[in-house]
Image: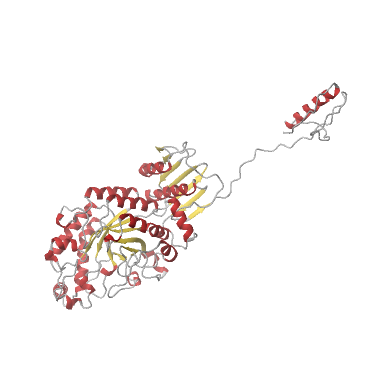
């Protein structure tokens, strides 16, 4: 609005002229017509006579109230990064007390995800209700790849939808991380899904006792990184770490109770993580042999290799099968790991000469061409037959698979490839070209071995982030891309060979960035857009 200053007192006609001028200007400023234009009177002293009014001011052009012009949005800042984001113009979404988390139609199964997200964002959870301004709506249904989701920010609200509960959960992780990183979720639509179906962490809880609370912390960490598998290697030479009803004599003093295991399983299920248990046999059974020394394998020279049971003795099979039947009931997940690695008899240059008892048993069972490797393969297949009726997918380490024998490993066994250092080592392509499906635990990048024995060094997140992909199964060379569909994913593995080398807290800190880098590369194996320093900085903000 224009300002006018009346400088000093007005008398008679001059005062009347001034009043007329002010009335005219006021009318103009309200958008009223004022006739022909005349000179501006801003700051001027009126001098019109009583019979002649001053010319009116020009009529201003009306202008609409300006609308805020939002810049085009950018993708949310998350770890792992989202696969696709359709940008849009708008304010995005921020948590506010007037908003809440609601469930869409027929989505009551997402109540746990809804309550978790509401607590994390500090907004109310309202259950099944129509979404309003400021709300986050979770909905399950429709089509799409497993674990996929669509997250839409529009009209001041968020909708996260997916074909399964896991996908919707991962959408809530994206929202949580974006808010944690920047305070908001940008306008637009995220369309996201994992590149690999198996993504996780493998823990050796046999050589080192980890508390249930520590394991639960890792589960929470994994959930936020969209990882979905936790391997528990709970039986080895140094310990057997879960309570047993069938063979309590083999259990170590420090162990998890079954109540603690059930608590771990419940938390894992809430984060859509499957626990993959492993009782490794016929090697790595030192804790069982300690209670049953008659099961110990003995070489021709009288050597008793640690952890190796005599697989020609039916008593060894009976104890292992008892344990398998017991723990397959405790663990409801879709996978079981049979182990089968590093059986010492097969690490000898001449197993038949070193272990003539095993050689004789192989010939007796499989004919004159039978060898020790056939006896070991038969052991693996027999253990698989015990677990298979539960419907679980079966896994075994790559050095438990042998070629050229009378007996072949069962076709439904997934290969967990970790090493190429064993005698007679086979390249990953050997398994892939035979049609095997494979999970990557490459010991060059993904093995965190406490104490760093045998030339192992603690892996770094940067090396995984910049150099590794799921195709790099052995060493540093990727397998041909045509085998990508057979590589089901990867797990980062913690092995406690020198269990006192690090505390629980040091292990958690040491694996933090490597696990974060793995999560990025199994969700999207393409070259990341962020530099390592940018990625590390972002990870610190969102986790």
**Image quarter in which the N terminus is found:** top right
Can you give x and y, in whole percent of width and height, for residue 422 in the image?
28, 73
* Residue at (41% x, 55% y) in the render: 145
Q: Position of residue 236 (x, y in %)?
A: 22, 62
Q: Is residue 421 above or below residue 140?
A: below
Lateral position of residue 280 relative to residue 40, left or right: left
Residue 272 in view: no
> Residue 417 vs residue 357: left or right?
right
Q: Is residue 172 above or below residue 305?
A: above
Depth check: give the residue in front, 126 or 1.
1
Mark yes or no: residue 55 visible: yes
Q: Quadrant of residue 14?
A: top right
Location of residue 10 by image quarter = top right
Measured from the top left, where is residue 235 in percent x and y?
A: 22, 59
Q: Nearer the viewer, residue 185 or 301?
A: 301
Residue occupying the far left of the picture: 294
Q: Position of residue 18 (x, y in %)?
A: 81, 26
Residue at (84%, 31%) from the top-left corner?
A: 55
Figure disc tally:
0
């Amino acid at each position: 609005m224009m300002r006018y200053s009346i400088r000093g007192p007005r008398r008679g006609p001059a005062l009347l002229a001034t009043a007329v001028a002010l009335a005219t200007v006021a009318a103009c400023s309200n958008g009223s017509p004022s006739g022909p234009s005349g000179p501006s009177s801003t700051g001027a002293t009126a001098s019109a006579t009583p019979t002649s009014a001053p010319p009116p001011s020009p009529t201003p052009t009306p202008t609409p109230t300006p609308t805020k012009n939002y810049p085009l949005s950018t993708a949310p800042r998350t770890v792992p990064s989202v696969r696709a984001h359709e940008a849009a113009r708008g304010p995005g979404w921020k948590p506010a007390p007037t908003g809440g988390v609601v469930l869409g139609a027929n989505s009551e199964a997402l109540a746990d995800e809804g309550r978790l997200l509401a607590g994390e964002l500090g907004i109310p959870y309202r259950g099944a209700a129509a979404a309003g301004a400021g709300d986050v709506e979770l909905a399950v249904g429709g089509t799409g790849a497993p674990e996929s989701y669509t997250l839409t920010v529009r009209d001041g609200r968020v909708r996260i939808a997916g074909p399964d509960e896991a996908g919707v959960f991962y959408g809530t992780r994206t929202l949580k991380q974006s808010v944690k990183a920047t305070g908001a979720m940008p306008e637009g639509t995220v369309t996201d899904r994992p590149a690999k179906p198996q993504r996780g962490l493998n823990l050796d809880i046999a050589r080192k006792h980890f508390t249930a609370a520590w394991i639960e912390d890792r589960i929470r960490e994994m959930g936020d990184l969209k990882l979905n598998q936790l391997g528990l290697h709970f039986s080895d030479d140094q310990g057997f770490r879960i309570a047993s009803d069938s063979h309590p004599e083999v259990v170590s003093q420090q162990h998890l109770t079954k109540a603690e295991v059930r608590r771990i399983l419940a938390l894992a299920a809430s984060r859509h993580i499957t626990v993959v248990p492993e009782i490794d046999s016929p090697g790595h059974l030192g804790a069982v042999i300690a209670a049953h020394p008659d099961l110990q394998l003995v070489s021709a020279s009288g050597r008793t290799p640690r952890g190796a049971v005599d697989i020609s003795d039916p008593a060894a099979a009976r104890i292992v099968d008892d344990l398998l039947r017991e723990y397959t009931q405790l663990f409801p997940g879709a996978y079981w790991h049979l182990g089968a690695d590093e059986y010492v008899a097969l690490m000898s240059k001449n197993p038949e000469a070193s272990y003539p008892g095993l050689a004789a048993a192989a010939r007796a069972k499989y004919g004159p061409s039978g060898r020790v490797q056939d006896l070991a393969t038969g052991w693996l297949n027999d253990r698989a037959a015990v677990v298979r009726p539960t419907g679980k997918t079966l896994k075994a380490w790559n050095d438990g698979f042998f070629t050229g024998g009378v007996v072949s490993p069962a076709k439904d066994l997934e290969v967990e490839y970790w090493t190429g250092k064993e005698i007679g080592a086979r390249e990953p392509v050997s398994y892939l070209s035979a049609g095997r499906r494979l999970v990557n635990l490459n010991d060059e990048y993904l093995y965190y071995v406490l104490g760093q024995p045998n030339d192992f060094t603690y892996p770094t997140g940067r090396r995984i982030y910049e150099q590794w992909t799921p195709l790099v199964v052995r060493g540093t060379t990727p397998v041909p891309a045509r085998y990508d569909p057979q590589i089901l994913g990867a797990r980062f593995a913690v092995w406690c060979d020198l269990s006192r080398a690090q505390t629980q807290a040091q292990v958690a800190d040491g694996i933090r960035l490597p696990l974060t880098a793995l999560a990025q590369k199994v969700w999207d194996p393409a070259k990341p857009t962020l530099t390592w320093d940018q990625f590390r900085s972002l990870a610190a903000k969102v986790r």
